[in-house]
Amino acid sequence: MTYEQVKNRVLQLLNQYTVAGTHVPSSYNNQQDYLNRIPDLVNDAMMEIATTVRKIPALLHLNIDDEYTEFGDLVQFELPEDFYQFKTGDTLLMTEDGHVFHTNRYAIQGRNYLLIPRRELEKGRTYTLTYYRYPIPADLTSTDPLDNVPETHEAIPYYVAAFIVIHDDSFLYASFYNKYEDKLSKMSPDISAEVHSVGDVYNFDSGYVYWS
């Protein structure tokens, strides 16, 4: 759905879309008040969904030619502004000869930086990390769909409608919000592995698992 389609769906749920087949003007009753509240509520819903049941994956490619800061034997990269959290177990190292390995040789520093051993990026090597990003805010004038997958768009109008009527009609609020939660419950999160670094007590220092 585009923002315009979500907005119209919200107005339909509120019986504020048409009267006798004619679109309700913004000057009628509380129509403009509703229209003013919709954008922020759409973005609230998108953020909640993208940080819970339907996270949005993105790729980050890093090599020695990118901007970084020296940090001892490590190099420090700044994470993207839309970074939410890493998808663990899905970090790849591509060597200069084109081989690809799974690796866990990186560390998160706070929420803004990534540390990688400098020698990992020498000789043309590239790190590819999968992370989850925040959603792109709704563009009120765009004809493009909202961010995230289509099934998330179907839930958003119920969230918005619920919080528009929250102070006026508790029954309608509960009905809309329950429908929103019902749609979320049917969007089971993707299955993923959680991978964490452990100490190398045998001093093998292998570091990689070959991936083909």
Image: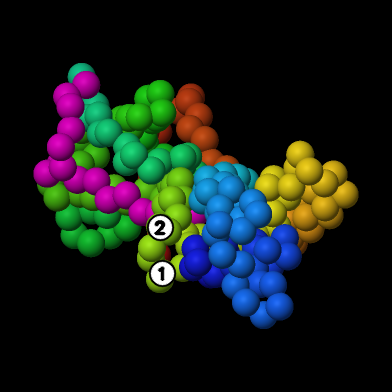
Residue in the image at 15% along x and 37% along y: 67
Query: In the drawing, does residue 165 fall left or right of residue 105?
Result: right
* 153 shown above or below 46: below
Mark 1 or mark 2: name the one nearer the start of the chain. 2
Q: Which residue is mark 1?
A: 144
Mark 1, secondary structure of its residue: loop
Residue in the image at 17% along x and 27% along y: 69
Query: In the drawing, does residue 70 fall left or right of residue 4?
Result: left
**Residue 174 showing in the rendered view:** no
Color style of the picture: rainbow
Few, some or many residues within 10 Å of mark 2 (<14, 14–19, 20+): some
Where residue 134 appears, as percent x and y from the top left, is: 46, 46
Residue in the image at 33% along x and 32% along y: 114
The question of residue 36 being in magenta is answered with: no
Few, some or many residues within 10 Å of mark 1 (<14, 14–19, 20+): few
Residues 165 and 85: in front is: 165
Q: Quadrant of residue 11?
A: bottom right
Q: Which residue is mark 2?
A: 139
The question of residue 64 being in magenta is answered with: yes
Q: Amino acid at mark 2?
A: Asp
Q: Amino acid at mark 1?
A: Asp
Quadrant location, the C terminus? bottom left
Query: Which residues lie in the magenta part?
Result: 56-71
Measured in 3D between alpha carbons, the distance from the residue under mark 1 to the one under mark 2, in whole angstroms, is 8 Å
Residue in the image at 53% along x and 48% along y: 36
**Residue 75 showing in the rendered view:** yes
Where residue 141 appears, as percent x and y from the top left, is: 38, 63
Q: Quadrant of residue 13?
A: bottom right
- The reply to whether the C-beta atoms of the residues labelled 1 and 2 are less than 8 Å apart is yes
Residues 12 and 159: in front is: 12
